[in-house]
Amino acid sequence: MWKEDFDGGRRVAVVLSEEDQIVDAKAVRKYLTGQEGLRWERDGLEVLWYPGLDHATVWDTKERREPMLDIVRRFTTTVSVGGTPNGPVDVLDLPTELGV
């Protein structure tokens, strides 16, 4: 996907870890933002940058997960999908229920 494909009609978030073993995160950040910084946002595109971390270590602590979960919460709405004996089940309540 190219940045020109982000038409501004849909919000897009990209999370990059500086020491990622899968992609050249520095090149991707430069391509998407042209800037440095931990967080960059413009025209519906948001980029999070985790310096010194690899592909999976961004998930290791609650403090690192929280910015990503914040994006998910902001990009989505809660949708009721049915009921249980305890009431309706909301799809986006999962992070809270899982204690993340």
Image (cartoon, helix red, strand yellow):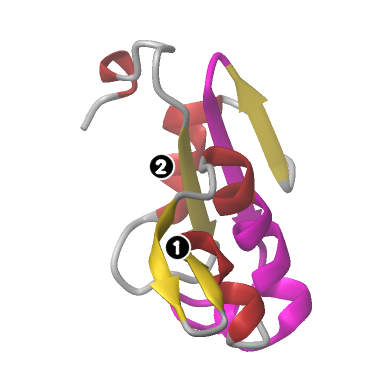
Q: Amino acid at mark 2?
A: Val
Image coordinates of residue 26 in percent, x first then y, are 49, 49
Residue 16 showing in the rendered view: yes
- Look at the picture and state if 46 lies above or below 44: below
**Foreground residue, 47 or 75?**
75
Earlier sequence position, callout 1 versus callout 2: 2
Q: Which residues are magenta?
A: 43-70
Quadrant of residue 47 within the rendered picture: top right
Image coordinates of residue 10 in percent, x first then y, are 40, 22
Residue pushed farthest left?
1
Q: Secondary structure at mark 2?
A: helix
Of marks 1 and 2, the one in the foreground? 1
Q: Secondary structure at mark 1?
A: helix
Q: In the drawing, does residue 55 fall left or right of residue 69?
A: left
Q: In the drawing, does residue 49 fall left or right of residue 17?
A: right
- Point out which mark residue 6 bears: none
Question: What is the C-alpha distance between the residues marked 1 and 2?
Answer: 32 Å
Which quadrant of the figure contains the N terminus? Answer: top left
Q: In the drawing, does residue 88 fall left or right of residue 35?
A: left
Q: How many marks?
A: 2
The residue singled out by tag 1 in the image is 91
- Look at the picture and state if 100 lies above or below 7: below
Q: Amino acid at mark 1?
A: Val
Image coordinates of residue 56 in percent, x first then y, are 46, 81
Image coordinates of residue 27 in percent, x first then y, are 42, 43
The residue singled out by tag 2 in the image is 28
